[in-house]
Each structure stands twice: as structure tokens, then as C-alpha cells.
Image (cartoon, helix red, strand yellow):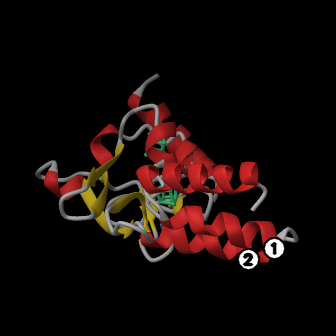
Amino acid sequence: MSFIRLVEYSSRRGVATHPYPEKPFEVDELYRGRPVLDASVCIGCGACANACPAETIRVETDYEKGVRRWTICYDRCIFCARCQEVCPVNAIELSREFELAARSREDLTVVAEFKLGSCAKCNSYLDVSIRHVELAQKLLEKSELVNIMRELAKYTVMCMKCRRSFFVEKLGEATRGG
Ligand code: SF4
Ligand code: SF4
């Protein structure tokens, strides 16, 4: 195509490109961009980390400090939305943000920390956050099987060791008929 014909063709068709980044670029509402965590809602359960196929999200537990650390590093994200799908409390959502260029990996990393719950019997740290325990208790309280659930609710604030001895004790009482 000659240059003249090309100019004619272009003037007929109008501008086909977008002046980004001079002007903001609006993506489609279904666009999958940067996953954003609402740390005020997250219970630190780790379901998103288990489901993430790219190991973008990591959840580590420090039993010495009694802290669960949630980390996302956007340079690995494939924007599949599995984290959003599996989150039980809608704490993570894919935004429409696509500008993820950064100078260092640290700039692409977001961390959130959650305090671990502690055993009601021996005070050792549990494998779940305080917020997770509170949510479990709230759900149990709402249940129709409220009396059984109240009894079961005690297990949610016990470590595995105390839980085991609690069960053994209850089993003993039941066997003795008391
Ligand atoms: S969108 Fe997919 S790859 Fe990205 S953090 Fe969520 S689960 Fe992982
Ligand atoms: S699944 Fe949801 S609640 Fe659980 S750690 Fe991930 S973002 Fe937080």
C-alpha cells in the first residue's frame, strides 16, 4: 500500500490506538487485575495459599511469636482468581489494576500479620488466628444445634494436645455413665 493510500485509509478509519499512558486506560469490568487483600476481613486461614497454582500467596506460622504471616508477591501471579473463589470470607478480590511494573520484588510484595489464638487450657498457641477462632465460635453460636455446639465450641480454643485429653476425659465420663 502506497503512503498516500495509507494516509487516506487511516483518515477514513480514524484513530485505532489509545494514547496510554498519557491518558488512563479503562479496562473491561471483567478484567482480572491485581488481587487485593482486605486485611481487616481476612482470618488468615490459608485457603488462598493452598489454592494458588503459582505459589504467589504464602502463609507461614511463627509459633514462637504467635503470629501468622500472609504474603503475596505479584511477580508470580497469573490472575487466575482461584484465591478469590476459595476465600470463605471474601477477603481477597481481583481488582482491575494492571500497572504492576516495579523496581524491586519488595515493591511487589504485600504482607499481613494475624495473631494466633491460644489454648484455653494450657495457653500454647493454636494453629489458627484469633479472628478465625472468633468466626468459628460465632458460626457455632448461630447453629440450631446450639447446646451440642456450645460444648463443641470449647474445642475451638484448645490445642491438639489438650483437645485429645479433653476427648479422652469425656469418653471416660460417658463410659462410666457420668
Ligand atoms: S490470582 Fe491466581 S495466581 Fe494470582 S494470587 Fe490468586 S490464585 Fe494465585
Ligand atoms: S482464603 Fe481469604 S481469609 Fe483465608 S487467608 Fe486467604 S484471603 Fe485470608
Residue picked out by circle 1: 146
Along the line of sight, the residue nearer the viewer: 87 or 94: 87
Along the line of sight, the residue nearer the viewer: 72 or 105: 72
Along the line of sight, the residue nearer the viewer: 55 or 158: 158
Q: Where is residue 170 in the image (x, y as percent from the top left)?
A: 65, 56
Q: Where is residue 144 in the image (x, y as percent from the top left)?
A: 88, 71
> In this view, which residue lies farthest toward the right?
144
Q: Is residue 73 visible?
A: no
Q: Nearer the viewer, mark 2 or mark 1?
A: 1
Residue picked out by circle 2: 141
Q: Quadrant of the C terminus?
A: bottom right
Callout 2 crowding tier (Cα within 10 Å): few <14, some 14–19, many ≥20: some
Q: Where is residue 138 in the image (x, y as percent from the top left)?
A: 66, 76
Q: Callout 1, which amino acid?
A: Val
Asked if residue 29 lies left or right of residue 146, the reply is: left
Q: Callout 2, which amino acid?
A: Glu
**Quarter of the rendering containing residue 58:** top left
